[in-house]
Image (cartoon, rainbow, N blue to C red):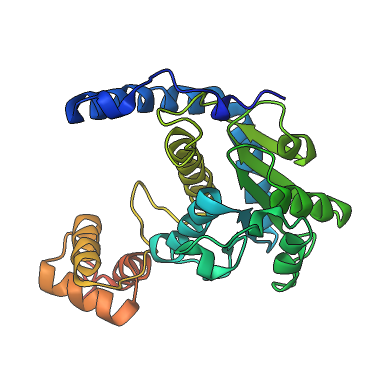
Amino acid sequence: MQTTTERDSHYNNLEQMTVAEILQNINKEDQTVALSVSKAIPQIEKLATVVTERMKAGGRLFYIGAGTSGRLGVVDASECPPTFGVPFDMVVGIIAGGDGAIRKAVEFAEDDAEQAWKDLSAFNITDKDVVVGIAASGTTPYVIGGLKTANQNKIATGCVVCNSGSPVAAIANYPVEVVTGPEFLTGSTRMKAGTAQKLVLNMLTTTVMIQLGRVRGNKMVDMQLSNHKLVDRAAKMVMAETGVDETTAADLLKKNGSVRKAVDFYRNNKPHPNPPR
């Protein structure tokens, strides 16, 4: 396979560039990422469809990855409960080296081909679930080993990689290949490749949650009301959906706990405009 993510940058003598030149050239490369992702939409559709099907049947989504890829999986998983009000273990991000590797790299953790399955087994993974490996290079042993064993246990597998024809994509049932090409800083896949992976994960879980009914119209009606900003946003949603004033909206939220429940409660208990005599 050709690891285009490891090829030499299109730019050289970076240290001789001005600050403006560095920023402009990084931005120039970043502008190619969305186009690369768009080419992979048919693959993302297949993966999103199977994840939706499994979740409707009570399954979960697991991400496995190392380094930047693993961290991106953890981020996407951790944002699903507050955004969509789902249980914290419905989408699970696992990083090689354990949670400590989120902040500090763990040497050689990604080279252990057996550890990913051990990490997945701690969650009592079953054939109702889906495992998605995230690996910019598509060659990470931790991810390869995890997907391989998942396949052996009849668990649906997917991946998000940034090279074509990679070992990870060859193993995954539902591969997503976003070929982002050489990085501005040679081999630094935290840049374009990482951006592409983040875009794909956003697309995947947002699509799945919409399909699961976790969005109404274009609103996050099940989001957790965990700070004042979100409470204020939720109140405005309730006001827009029901026509009540701010005080009433806040009271409905306090009593019902979410935008969805507050709106449904109001609609089910709204006084009739012309009550019978």
Counting labels gives 0
* Location of residue 174 (image quadrant): top right
Q: Establish if 102 lies above or below 46.
A: below
Q: Residue at x 42, y 27 (%)?
A: 34
Q: Position of residue 158 (x, y in %)?
A: 69, 44
* 275, 216: nearer the viewer: 216
Residue 26 visible within the image: no
- In this orientation, which residue lies closer to the viewer: 244 or 55? 55
Percent of width and height locating residue 96? 62, 60
Q: Quadrant of the C terminus?
A: bottom left
Residue 27 seen in render: yes
User: Where is residue 153 drawn, in percent x and y?
Assistant: 86, 57
Quarter of the image containing the N terminus?
Answer: top right
Q: Is residue 277 above or below residue 77?
A: below
Quarter residue 129 falls in = bottom right
* Residue at image point 29% right, 82% down: 255
Residue sitting at the far bottom: 255
Residue 32 at x, y percent in the picture: 41, 22
